[in-house]
Image (tube, rainbow, N blue to C red):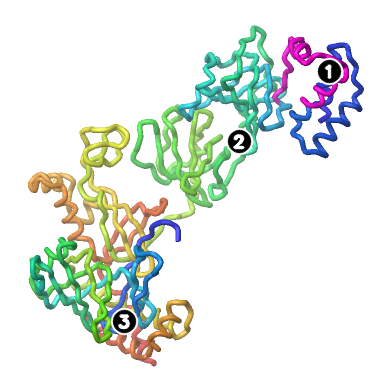
Amino acid sequence: MKQTAESIRERFLKLGIDVPMEDIESRLDELITKFKVPSNEAQRSVTNFFLKKYSIPKNEFYVRQAEPQLTKIVDISENGQWANLKAKVVQFWENTHDSISQVGLLGDETGIIKFTEWKNAELPKLEQGESYLFRSVVIGEYNGRFQVQLNKNSSVEKLTEAVEVGSGDFTLTARESELRNIADLVGGHWATVKGKVVQLWENSHESIEQAGLLGDPTGVIKFTNWASSELPDMEEGKSYLLKNIVVNEWDGKAQIQLNKSSSIEELNEDIEVRTSTFTYFGAMVDIQTGSGLIKRCPECKRALVKGACAEHGKVKGEYDLRIKSVLDSGTSTQDVLINRELTEKLVGLSLDSAIAMAADALDPGVVLDKLKHELVGRYYTVNGHKLDRYILADSITPRTSLDRELLDEMLTELEVE
Amino acid sequence: MAGFFREVARRVFAQELKDSNLASRDESDQYAPQYVMTPTGAKVNRIFLVGTLIEKEDIGTDSEYWRGRISDPTGSFLVYAGQYQPEAAQFLADCELPVFVAVVGKTSTYTTDDGNVLTSIRPESIQEVDEITRDLWVLDTAKQTLERIRAVEAEEDPNSKLAKEHYSTDTDYYRVMVKKAIESLSVPK
């Protein structure tokens, strides 16, 4: 509030009018503290009051204000506030949305802040390292942090004189995030984690460099390394320090993403992973559609539906075998995904013979029938990682003998009574 | 209840299912699943059973409608498959008797004119299986039935209480049933 009062006073000083500080402050205080008026509204109201008091025409006042009032980044403190600032484009980030034209960091001598330039703002492209005067930008708040938004009403003017940006290498220091345990990760934050690559998945999309599971002694989490991150690949079974990763939540589960500003460091140690593999025993009660001989999109590996990929349309698919099964223990059910390798082993049917079978019958449905015929109704123990409602099977074994111990135990109990 | 969930396939011996006459359904919702409450408190909508298919008959008049009788150590289940269960009907039409089968299906009840409640099974799947699968099912079902019997004796959950209230369940009778079932397994091979 002191700042606001000072800025009002300064503006009147420029007009040669010395408004007593106490007057400004007491008026501001009344509005802000007593009447809960937002400080920018209060500022306007107080300014107008003094304009009236000193008989200065409003339009004259605002026109005469040749130099726009500048805000320093460190002073940005209110959601919804309009501001003008001089700042340098420190860094561009990955553009995450169609409606955004540029996103990144701005810096001045007092700090740095995220900026977002909306596509519909129709502003010229900013260049990294250049300094600009940003007029009429809006301060937004997201996840407890302020950001600058450039919209239709904003304007950008390139400055010849570079704006000094705080300390030297401060993009790193500012965004170096805390080392955290995987189990403690929650969405909407930056973090640094140390973990071992437990599993790498088949790449499901061209924009993804690698995806899989990363584990540490506290848990396992899904990670995605975007192709645009330009980071090196990781190897299964090796441990890494991942700095400045983004944690977000999808479907209620945290996952981590590596982008341009993240870094990967291979570690010499072998990080112990809390085994979060699940074991489930039950009867296979269903094999769902989409199982058996399927075709996948060669681009993104998604399963095709009626010969078309949800992303890439009509494509010439690649054959694959998989089973989406449901195991049932009698008290719960569990969806289990069985990949091609396990399917081939479990059923004794190679992909090639499955293709031949389907070609023979002119119907890929015969493969699904065979799977149902061989598997449904039998008891299995499955081991694997849990993902959403599925277990991704690492192994699946048919139960082939009775648990004699359990049998004897039950017989004894029933005998006694 | 949030969203869709899959009904668990309960394990119940034929004798117990035959003794069941308490059907329930949430009346306010015509799409609500129908359940059969058994004397040991199993709330059955879907059922999984493995037994020996000992009889089959096409009882349909216009189109095929197959009835199969599947026995377990305590009695037998009746399954009915018609045009809406084409795979199961096909299986019943083609198979040779007797054969070990595994059935996943939905139970449905029918009240006769004299007030008897008959429970039958509409199969979602019938598959031929081997003997060990049948033995595994008997042990599995025995274990789960025994757990339910204990729960009824302790009256520990709402289903147990409801079952006890409705049937005045004689748990000893069902203990004998379980014993009979597993004794057939204990012969060393």
Within the image, what quadrant is residue A132 found in?
top right
Which amino acid type is shown beneath numbered disc 1? Answer: Glu
* Label annotation for residue A10: 1
In the rendering, at what x and y percent does residue A363 appear?
12, 47
Above or below, A166 relative to A249: above
Majority SS type along the magenta span:
helix
Q: Identify the secondary structure beneath mark 3.
A: loop
* Label annotation for residue A142: 2
* Label annotation for residue B20: 3
Q: Residue at x 82, y 16 (%)?
A: A11
Left or right side of B11 for A185: right
Q: Residue at x 44, y 35 (%)?
A: A225
Which amino acid type is shown beneath numbered disc 2? Answer: Tyr
Q: Quadrant of the N terminus of chain A?
A: top right
Residues marked 2 and 1, same chain: yes
Residues marked 1 and 3, same chain: no
Please tell me which residue lies in front, A196 or A144.
A144
Residues rendered magenta in the picture: A44-73
